[in-house]
Image: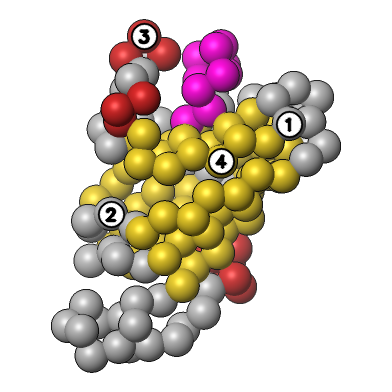
Amino acid sequence: MKRIGMAAVVAALLAVGACGDSGGDGDGDGGGAADDTRIAVIGTEFVFTPDAYLVDAGAEVKVTLSNEGSIEHNWVLLSEEIRSEDDLDTGMYLAEAIAQPGESGEVTFTAPAAGTYQVVCDIPGHFAAGMEGELTVSG
């Protein structure tokens, strides 16, 4: 997995913090509703901005992918890390937002167990060109 610069981490935390809803206690003991989290992502050739995201396990997550590029992009959360596009299998997809140029796509999902998950654009050639990110799920 590629290293993420501090600026990308700070940008992701600000994006998640600005869009999150702190409803409920989020402690996972059933005493309150899990936090709702909104993540706004911009896709261009060939990068996600931001490319790092932080959410709580069990949170309801809504990702909005705004495609500011000139070709289709998608945001795919994977259950396991890949090293090349040949490793991709749709059975690994935990969530996917698709957006045509100039449009937005959304996906809502429940954050998986604590850990670090790879995010990629699965359009042929995009991952190889560096279009990937990372979702960190805290427990």
- Please report the residue visible at 46 percent of the width from the left and 83 percent of the height from the top: 22
Mark 2, secondary structure of its residue: loop
- Please report the residue visible at 21 percent of the width from the left and 78 percent of the height from the top: 28
Upstream in sequence: badge 4 or badge 3: 3
Depth check, mark 4 against mark 3: the one in front is: 4
- Residue 100 is labelled as 1
Residue 127 colored magenta?
A: yes
Question: What's the CA distance linking mark 1 and mark 2?
Answer: 27 Å
Question: What's the CA distance linking mark 1 and mark 3?
Answer: 23 Å
| Quadrant of the image containing the C terminus | bottom left
Query: Are the residues tagged 4 and 1 within 8 Å (C-beta)?
Result: no
- Does residue 89 show up? yes
Provide the residue designation for mark 3: 86
Query: Are the residues tagged 2 and 4 within 8 Å (C-beta)?
Result: no
Upstream in sequence: badge 1 or badge 3: 3
Decide: few, some or many residues near mark 3? Use Cα within 10 Å; few <14, some 14-19, many ≥20: few
| Quadrant of the image containing the N terminus | top left
- Residue 97 is labelled as 4
Query: Are the residues tagged 3 and 2 within 8 Å (C-beta)?
Result: no
Q: Which amino acid, mark 1?
A: Gln
- Please report the residue visible at 30 percent of the width from the left and 66 percent of the height from the top: 58
Q: Is residue 33 left or right of residue 41?
A: left
Q: Residue 131, position in %: x, y?
A: 55, 27
Upstream in sequence: badge 1 or badge 2: 1
Mark 3, secondary structure of its residue: helix
Question: What's the CA distance linking mark 4 and mark 1?
Answer: 10 Å
Provide the residue designation for mark 2: 112
Query: Are the residues tagged 1 and 3 within 8 Å (C-beta)?
Result: no
Q: Residue 78, position in %: x, y?
A: 35, 35
**53, 6: nearer the viewer:** 53
Residue bounds of the magenta highlight: 120-129
Q: Residue 62, position in %: x, y?
A: 52, 59
